[in-house]
Image: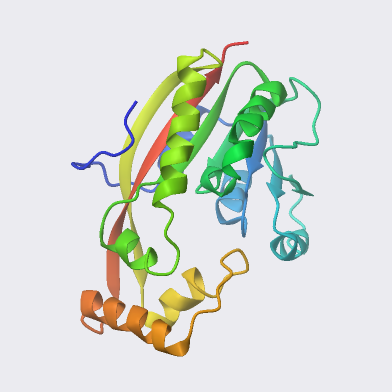
Amino acid sequence: MKLIEKNITKTIEEMYLLETLNLNNKTILELGCGAAAITKKVAQNGFNRKIIACEVDEVQHKKNLELNIKNIEFKLSGAEDIKLKDNSVDFIMMFKSFHHIPINKMQKALNEIQRVLKPNALAYISEPLFSGDLSDLISMFHNEEYVREETFKAIEKSVKNEQFKLFQEIFFQTPTSYENFEDFKSKLIDVSYNKHNFSKEFENKIKDKFNELSNNQKITFQKPFRVDILQNIK
């Protein structure tokens, strides 16, 4: 397993990877669904899919409940305390959420993932890499380098200890665009899970860095990811 891949050549949308894993006729658990952007896509693709989408942020969870999508059940729950029966889930997916679990609860979350997964079923854990211009920009106000390293260590340990089998590890990049700084700010700074109280002066420093990279135009970053697909071998 590898924490970082510097020479990523695969540029794809993440839904492509997901849909190679045959999600039809499955009960799918998403942990840390956020605003349910991918949740909705998975639910609306294919057929006979039941999605249980968990989110720990109460503000976002209330917004998700308003979506009222037939085959999605939203739950207020964290990965370290999943309110489901043993061996009840065919597939688990996590997108940019594992590193939000408190470090001292990461192993507990992996235990919970193993508990609710059916034997030989897969857990798809997608994490952004701390690499590239976008990561450097975000780290000005939200530096996640340490927690991303701890996330990798926890997953790697679960494989070394034979809690899970590493089914596949994939590195890819996907384009993400921002029309201007206000667009960037609304999507990455002014969000309920990213609490801050920095000054207007500091915000202007972030804005200056963004405009330096974007040249005051719409900008597209190539955002790198690592996906670890773990198989439950209990």
Front-lying residue, 206 or 52: 206
The vertical placement of 155 against 9, above or below, is above
Q: Quadrant of residue 175?
A: bottom left
| Colour setup of the view | rainbow
Q: Residue at x 30, y 62 (%)?
A: 136
Q: Residue at x 56, y 66 (%)?
A: 194
Residue 25 visible from this viewpoint: no
State how many labels appear: 0
Answer with left or right where residue 89 lies relative to residue 141.
right
Q: Residue at x 44, y 20 (%)?
A: 166
| Rendering coords of residue 98 (x, y %) | 54, 42
Q: Quadrant of the C terminus?
A: top right
Q: Quadrant of residue 2?
A: top left
Answer with left or right where residue 56 lies relative to residue 198.
right
Q: Residue at x 61, y 33 (%)?
A: 92
| Rendering coords of residue 210 (x, y %) | 30, 77
Q: Quadrant of the N terminus?
A: top left
Residue 133 visible from this viewpoint: yes
Answer with left or right where residue 157 lies relative to residue 42.
left
| Rendering coords of residue 42 (x, y %) | 58, 44
| Rendering coords of residue 81 (x, y %) | 75, 37
